[in-house]
Amino acid sequence: MAKAKTSLTVTEHPSILPVAGVQWGVSYAGIKASAVDADNTLQSETPKNDLALMALSAGTVLSGVFTRNAFSAAPVKIACQRMLAIANSTHQNPIYLLINSGNANAGTGAAGYAAAEESCQSLAAVAACDAAQVLPFSTGVIGQLLPVKCINIAAPAVWSQLSEDGWSQAASAIMTTDTVPKGFSRTLIIDDITITLSGICKGAGMIRPDMATMLAYVATDAAIAQADLDHLLQNAVQCSFNRITVDGDTSTNDACMLAATAVSSVTLSPAHKDWPIFQSALNDLFIDLSTSIIRDAEGATKFITINVNQGLDVEECLQVAYTVAESPLVKTAFFASDANWGRILAAVGRSGLVDLDVELVEIYLDDHLICDQGGTAKSYSEEAAMAIMAQTDITITINLQRGDIHQRVWTSDLSLDYVRINADYRT
């Protein structure tokens, strides 16, 4: 489907397009099972790729945002340190992002840090590069030491599989409780040259990002300076990954990376006439990625959009939106398709807004007014409300009528399967 914006056409694509200057490789390492026998061979009855490698060509500019969780994982700490070194480096070397699923390597202390370092060193030995050019990323169970021996053995295999067409395989390899791989692309024609934007992500539970999502990797073949790329990423994250919640839990391993390979001859900056179009296309891609996490949330049966309008500032709009989105009572009502809208009203009331005039608050399910003037709307219909609650996609709109700020958050319902999935996560 094509989206026309001013004179420029942005095209969405049904498959993940390759980006010049980016290669992906995947391999099975047996990380979750730690299936390494005495002969250093990997054993599994049903092997599933759990190791991915993103190779970025020399000259690529890389930007990233990471979790603010105080117990950030060892790979997060190392990746952050190396991001600073790469950004300040005068050497235009290739960059490698090594990602494992099945083990978060978080809450593992000094031993976990050493294991993450060792995994980078094993890949560096294969790629004939400095270990500082390798950034580690992990996702999976917290509190268990990374079986780095598995990664060491699998490093040559993941390196040998590098290909420009490896995006879809990588999207599958980084999954944990995800049920589907997540990836999207956009193309833009700028200065008569086609620019590609592609991205993949993973995440289904432990989702309330405080900068990004569990793991996301996006790249473009445009040339963009470091400061401008950082600005693009921060802007895109704020309207997408920082506006989703499944369960209100911020992971120890959240990371979102944006790369500009500069392989195309198009250089973009805020001074370029099409800069706003590029930012808009990037934002749309990030929204597709982030909302795909909500649609695949653990046990989810509903995709819920929460609009909070007419607030005094961004903070209070988000305060209301997240209070509603993360209320177990609201979420279970949606799972039951029960028009128990009093739970929404109660969540708004306890969100902590100062001097909230409840007589002015309006609450809608889709376009059906359910609450105004402090109580049930005169036009309210239980039948209409129940029909809306039975839908898969539902919008809650809350008009505070005390300002002119609007914010949007996406969430899911809370089902029996969510409890089952997380109760059985380690078994």
Image (cartoon, rainbow, N blue to C red):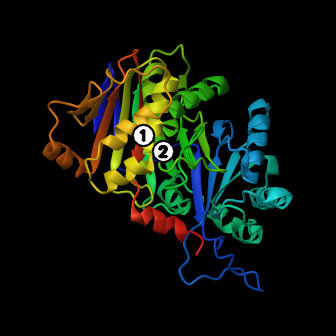
Q: Are marks 1 and 2 in contact (CB under 8 Å)?
A: no
Marks 1 and 2 sit apart, C-alpha to C-alpha, by 11 Å
Horizontally, residue 137 falls left or right of residue 373, namely right
Residue 275 visible here? yes
Q: Residue at x 50, y 61 (%)?
A: 172
Q: Secondary structure at mark 2?
A: strand
User: Residue 254: x, y in percent?
Assistant: 62, 47
Type of amino acid under label 1: Val
The quadrant the N terminus occupies is: top left
Q: Count all numbered tags in the image, as a single digit.
A: 2
Residue at which label 1 appears? 324
Q: Residue 353, labelled with which disc?
A: none
User: Residue 221: x, y in percent?
Assistant: 53, 36
Horizontally, residue 381 falls left or right of residue 36, namely left
Badge 2 crowding class, 10 Å Cα cut-off, few under 14, some 14 to 19, many 20 or more, is many
User: Residue 420: x, y in percent?
Assistant: 47, 69
The quadrant the C terminus occupies is: bottom right
Asked which quadrant contains residue 401, the reply is top left
Frontmost residue, 193 versus 232: 232
Mark 1 or 2: in front is 1
Frontmost residue, 377 versus 174: 377
Type of amino acid under label 2: Thr
Q: Residue at x 71, y 81 (%)?
A: 41
Residue at which label 2 appears? 245
Q: Residue at x 36, y 43 (%)?
A: 343
Q: Secondary structure at mark 1?
A: helix
Horizontally, residue 287 falls left or right of residue 333, namely right
Residue 196 visible here? no
User: Residue 248: x, y in percent?
Assistant: 53, 46
Frontmost residue, 3 versus 405: 405
